[in-house]
Amino acid sequence: MESGYLFNMFVFLAAACVVVPLASRFRLGSVLGYLVAGVLIGPFGFGFIENPQEILHFAEFGVVMMLFLIGMELEPATLWRLRRMIVGLGGLQVLLTTTAFASIGLAMGYDWPISLAVSMALSLSSTALVLQMLQEKGLMQTSAGESAFSVLLFQDIAVIPILIIMPLLATATPSIDPNTADFLRDIPAYAHALIIAGVITAVVLIGRYFSRHLFRFVAKTRLREVFTATSLALVVGITLLMLAVGVSPALGAFVAGVVLANSEYKHTIETDIEPFKGLLLGLFFISVGMGMDFALMQEQPLSISAAVAILVATKAIILFVLGRKFGLAGSQDTVFSFALAQGGEFAFVLLQFAGGLEIISPDQSSFLILTVALSMASTPLMMMLNDRLVRPYFMSVLPKRDYDTIDDSDNQVIIAGYGRFGQIIGRFMSAQGVNLTILESDPDQIELLRRFESKVYYGDASHPELLRNAGAAHAKLLIVAVDNADKAVEIVRIARNEFPHLTIFSRARNRRHAYELDKAGASYFQRETFDSSLVMAQEAMKFFGFNAITMKKKAKKFKEFDEKMLRDSFEFFDKEPELINFARQARSELERILQGDQLIDESLEKKA
């Protein structure tokens, strides 16, 4: 192996290790970190790597892996559950965005084949960028995250017909990809498109039956590395077949994923390939950063800035309007529209494909590729801007929904917050005939719960008047189960001041939060992960052969001791040296108690 390749790989990894943690530290996200790292080490930065195209071809395999995993998500059950969002929201987004950009192109005087080809490429967003950002921010399970996933899924499927349509738009004899089979080079464009469709259909149909037997045969070897090699070989093999018929490798991987979507070995394959995907995607984004042509940016700064602004603004407006039409609340809709407002990695593929077909010129291709890259680079910044400025302002000027009129104001128990924590409490108490008044401040959560026929009232429990309307003046117990730590302390403080007779139970995030709740006047608090962690600790000890009854007794003593020490530590919580000394003494005392019990248990076992 040449030292030059090793040096390039070292520079890639070192840049990622330095820049990405810094970007994450300032909440800019890993993707922006990768892009910045690419700019710094590329020809327009410090120049450590002069030819990013050499690395880009290798790094594009990260997109290939990602598309393979996305294809595996196309289970019939998933498609059916999200059919309205995928076909309706995703289909309308692609159609309206393509129409909007095609209209802009025609208005600027470009021919309709150029306008249509470019608009189809720009209608797609970055699956790699958006999914990684949503996962990092914990937004995948929200309505905005699910809607974004549905749109991205439709866009990835839409690449297939777009790649078939592109050759039909060519007005000149296109240059042939050297990977394309010789017998396909002289046939008409429509015949080529039919062959592509036929090959894709054949791969899906044959693969669904063949792959099951193949992986069953390989699994019998019980060699994990052979299983991983088979998975990668299948991806690469189908990718090569797609290249042979003149289709992008990313589409080939997507088809390979579809083939395995219903395989019983699907989850094992995903686990094996996930590390490759993450590393190679990072390299892909670094390559994108390296490939940004800042010389072109210096030549045409206003044109490129305007193109990026038009691209992002047009997509964001269309997405926002569609999000409202499909029931996304304002807070979720801004996340949805900002997240998908950029161009995507498929735009690089489609624009290069259009250039090879001579639909667009090399200069136009370079201009558009830089525009897409800059739109991707701007997305993490836009998301940060949305979180800190746009959403708070937007929510402040929107007409606020009136709090619900509460009918159950004579109940003795009020639960504030009905997420994953509050629902367990509510279901347990309701099943035993206890009547509850439940308050929740998230409109999206309210709508979701009401679909399951749960009686939940919309309102913010930090408002004294709402607590009064909920019956706090004569209720006996208030359970604060909101997931926002500061909000929980605020509710406890207000409830204690306004309704001193109330017994207040509260969910605590950690020891510091428990301390704040105690100061605010909570009668009882429960750390949200303490009991579940202690149960798992018992199971872990039982796994290593320790007696189950003994572990249960020790867990009980551990819990009693920890809760006592926690309350005793409140005296020192704002005095760090004293708190550290107290924690050391408590740890030694706990070890003495548990180890003393172990000696007693061992002595009793010997006598028995």
Image (cartoon, grey):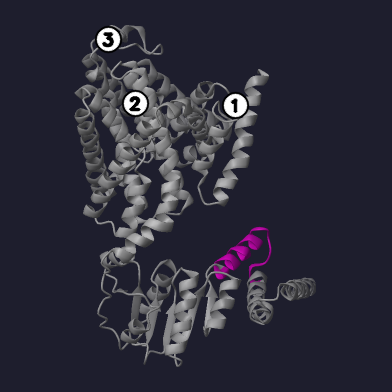
Residue 606 seen in the current view: yes
Q: Residues within 10 Å of mark 3 (few under 14, many from 20)?
A: some
How many marks overall? 3
Q: Quadrant of the N terminus?
A: top right
What amino acid type should be assigned to the residue bearing mark 3? Answer: Thr
Tell me the residue at 44%/74% (across/down).
Answer: 481
Q: Which mark is residue 517?
A: none
Q: Which residues are magenta?
A: 530-549
Residue 284 locus on image (x, y percent):
49, 32
Q: Residue at x 30, y 12 (%)?
A: 174
Q: CA distance from mark 2 to mark 1?
A: 28 Å
Find disc 2 in the rendering and name its residue. 350
Q: Nearer the viewer, residue 345 or 114?
A: 114
Residue matched to label 1:
47
Q: Position of residue 522 (x, y in %)?
A: 52, 83
The type of residue carrying mark 2 is Leu
